[in-house]
Amino acid sequence: MVVALAAMGFFFYDAVRDRTVKVGDMAPDYAIQAIDGKTVSRDSLLGKVVLLNFWASWCGPCVEETPTMVQLHQAFGDKGFVILGVSVDQKDENYKRFLKRFRVNYLTARDPEKKIADTYRTYRYPESYLIDKSGKVVQKLVGDEWIKNPQRLAQDIKALL
């Protein structure tokens, strides 16, 4: 009886504990096929500074942040910085139309089942994680607040490189 109660207690605790990815955590692993057909994973990006960005074409703040992300990629993309934009769009045509409209120049993938977003406990868009070369989360950017001071993020990226 005691063992059964302990097991039930563990399963209850496990179900309700906060699994939100926080600054200082190792970024959870994932694998996703990017628009270029290649599989991308956390481990394949180790050794690079990564901005993992969850977005959707219907998200106003996502639209607002995209031009700045294009600029960040232009500034640091050849220095070991990777942006991986993970769209949660259900429709492939909406995803592709967004990429074309905003001339997205960084790595993107579509996750319509929200498997990776669920792993990261992401439910608001946009939401981004700045991940260092070892795979550790150093910043979590929820919403578009960072867009008010993109120079700060650029400085942080530069310092990590």
Image: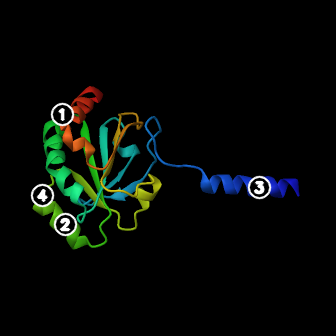
For mark 2, does the 10 Å Cα neighbourhood hold few (<14), some (14 to 19), or many (20 or more) residues? some
Say whether disc 4 or disc 1 marks the residue closer to the N-terminus: 4
Kind of residue at disc 3 = Ala
| Numbered circle sitting on residue 102 | 4
Which residue is denoted by mark 3 in the rendering? 7
Query: In percent of the image, x 15 and y 67: which residue is there?
Result: 97
Kind of residue at disc 4 = Phe
How far apart are the alpha carbons under marks 3 and 4? Answer: 51 Å
Q: Position of residue 26 (x, y in %)?
A: 46, 39
Which residue is denoted by mark 2 in the rendering? 96
Foreground mark, 4 or 1, reads 1
How far apart are the alpha carbons under marks 4 and 2? Answer: 10 Å
Judge left or right: residue 1 versus residue 59. right
Q: Is residue 98 above or below residue 9?
A: below
For mark 1, does the 10 Å Cα neighbourhood hold few (<14), some (14 to 19), or many (20 or more) residues? few
Q: Position of residue 105 (x, y in %)?
A: 15, 51
Q: Is residue 14 above or below residue 135?
A: below
At numbered mark 1, what does the secondary structure look like: helix, strand or loop? helix
